[in-house]
Image (spheres, helix red, strand yellow):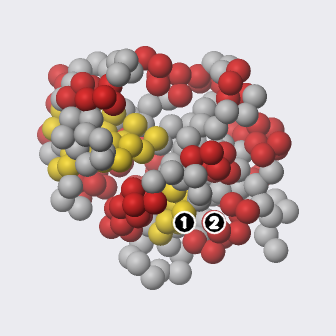
Amino acid sequence: MNIGVIGPGNIGEVIIRKLRDQGYRVKMANARGPESLKDLAAKTGAMPVSVEQVVQDVDMLFIVVPQKAIPELPKGLLNKARKETIVIDVGNYYPFRDGRIDELENGLTESVCVEIPSKALMAAGRPAGSRDRVALPISGDNTKAKEIVAQLIDRIGFDSVDAGTIAESWRQQPGSPVYCTNPTKEELRLWLKKVDRSSLAANREKGLKAYYPTRDADYQAQIEAHRSVLINGIKQ
């Protein structure tokens, strides 16, 4: 399988490392050009290319950029991809970083597909069948594509849960009890059903306030910070 990654920042770099560890062929690109990615290429074996090239001849494309950067991608970029290429949006909307986007504030879905902190993504992978294996939600409108993504997620050490369509992906946006809380498959299935859409914005801010003191801590401390405010009252 050939995979492209746009945005090898904190999360993007971890995704690249996980994929390369499993032997996938990976191309990567950012707005600064291939030259800026030489060091990461040397460390991981991923191929640095232009943004236009990264979408070509790949089976799966990860878009890992801030929400505000989406409109800055070249117009018609995905027209250069194959029709069957699976596109995975790993971005999230945060007003303090992206500026206020009225459409999202008024309920437009962010189309998020995978949620997990970068430190946890690097360290929390477990063999299939492990009791503490973390599960990731996958939202999309193509059942076959979601099956392929689920297989990839399993290979890099995580369970997955089908979280419904793109229109339903608001259930895993920042402020949701499944957002950056490292749920097991059983917890994820339960909590996805219990998300209150009207509380997402307020809980997003609570989550940020809890997270800030743990920015330099290990991923377990970060996860506990999110859990302390996002799953209160959720467990049965």
Q: Quadrant of residue 63?
A: top left
Is label 1 or label 2 in front?
Answer: 1
Q: Is there any visible trace of residue 222 in the rendered image?
A: no
First in sequence: mark 1 vs mark 2: 1
Q: Quadrant of residue 49?
A: top left
Between 79 and 202, the residue placed more toward the observer is 79
Give the residue at mark 1. Answer: 161
- Label 1 vs label 2: CA separation? 7 Å
Q: Is residue 195 left or right of residue 51?
A: right
Is residue 195 shown above or below 73? below
Residues packed near mark 1 inside 10 Å, few (<14), some (14 to 19) or many (20 plus): some
Q: Quadrant of residue 1?
A: bottom left
Q: Amino acid at mark 1?
A: Val
Give the residue at mark 2. Answer: 188
Q: Is there any visible trace of residue 200 in the rendered image?
A: yes
Identify which residue is drawn at 80% across, 38% down: 202
Is residue 41 shown above or below 185? above
Residue 11 placed where, x, y %? Answer: 42, 43
Identify which residue is drawn at 44% across, 66% down: 158
Tags 1 and 2 touching, CB below 8 Å: yes
Is residue 198 shown above or below 190? above
Residue 199 placed where, x, y %? Answer: 82, 44
